Amino acid sequence: MKKSVKERILETSIHLFQEHGYHGVTVEKIVTEAGTSKGGFYHNYKSKDELLYEIHDVFISYVIEKAEISYVENKTPVSKLSAILHSFIKVFDMYKPYITVFYEESAYLNDEFKQIINEKRDRYRKLLQKVIEEGQESGDFRKELPPNIVTMAIIGMINWTYKWFKQDGPLTMEEITAVFKDLILHSIVTEKGFEEAKHLNQLLSFAGVIQTDLSV
């Protein structure tokens, strides 16, 4: 299927930003590489700033949508958290170039776009923290752990994946996801939560996963 002008501009800019950096790429360079015109660019984006914001919005919108679906479709805190983690980690495979460009170049965004981004990130963080709090109330997650710190620890650990994950590396993202789930769940579940996580095959020891080489 032929890509739209907007799609071509977005994908071309990601490639160019990765290669030359945000300030090393002009609108003229983008439209030349994308095979369009400045009119085509400004019809879809008001500025390079808006384009950089769009790069972030693509993957954060996916993460939020999947997290909200996971919250509704799953009934227990353990199953909700497992599903949310799965879609969160998966995004670093699906949108690795988008995430890399954004994290490397986000300092150049203006305050208006930074505010929108922070609001979306807060929306995701609050949903994740809600699941942690519900798990503590139900007895599935350890109550002595501050839920806000647990939430930020999870987000911080997984966010760093963009730095080291290699799509042609020895482990697939599914295998890496299994490791993350095991680490996170083992650190926060109670005995009650452990039994459910084991029943759902969310722990490496009970998922039939044989790990021979965890180097990345």
Image (cartoon, rainbow, N blue to C red):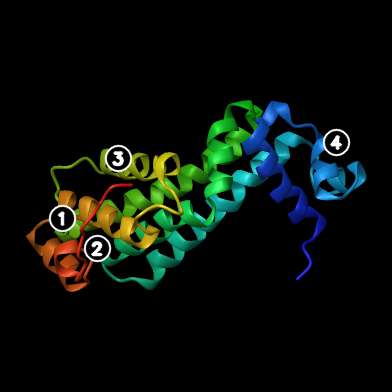
Q: Earlier in the sequence, mark 1 or mark 3?
A: 3
Q: Residue at x 60, y 40 (%)?
A: 116
**Residue 78, disc:** 2
The residue tagged 4 is 28
Coordinates of residue 82 in the picture (x, y in percent): 30, 62
SS state under label 3: helix
Q: Which mark is residue 189?
A: 1
User: Badge 1: how crowded within 10 Å, few (<14), some, or many (20+)?
Assistant: many
In the rendering, at what x and y percent does residue 201 appear? 21, 70
First in sequence: mark 1 vs mark 2: 2
Labels 1 & 3 near each other (Cβ < 8 A): no
Between 156 and 216, the residue placed more toward the observer is 216
Local crowd size for mark 4, using a 10 Å CA cut-off: few (<14), some (14–19), many (≥20): few
CA separation in Å, label 4 and label 2: 50 Å
C-alpha separation, residue under disc 1 versus residue under disc 2: 8 Å
Q: Amino acid at mark 2?
A: Val
The percent position of residue 19, horizontal first and vertical second, equals 65, 36
Vertical comparison of 70 with 142: above or below: below
| Of pointers 3 and 2, the one earlier in the residue sequence | 2
Evaluate if marks 4 and 2 touch, with contact meaning CB atoms under 8 Å apart: no
Badge 1 marks a residue whose secondary structure is loop
Work out how far the residue at label 1 is from the one at label 3, CA to CA, in angstroms. 15 Å
Query: Quick one: label 3, few (<14), some, or many (20+) residues within 10 Å?
Result: few
* 3D distance between C-alphas at marks 4 and 1: 53 Å
Asked if disc 1 and disc 2 are in contact, CB closer than 8 Å, the reply is yes
Q: Earlier in the sequence, mark 4 or mark 2?
A: 4
> Within 10 Å of the Cα at label 2, are there few (<14), some (14-19), or many (20+) other Cα atoms?
many
Measured Cα–Cα span from mark 3 to mark 4 = 41 Å
Which quadrant is home to the N terminus?
Answer: bottom right
116 lies left or right of 29: left
- The quarter holding residue 90 reads bottom left
Residue 153 image label: 3
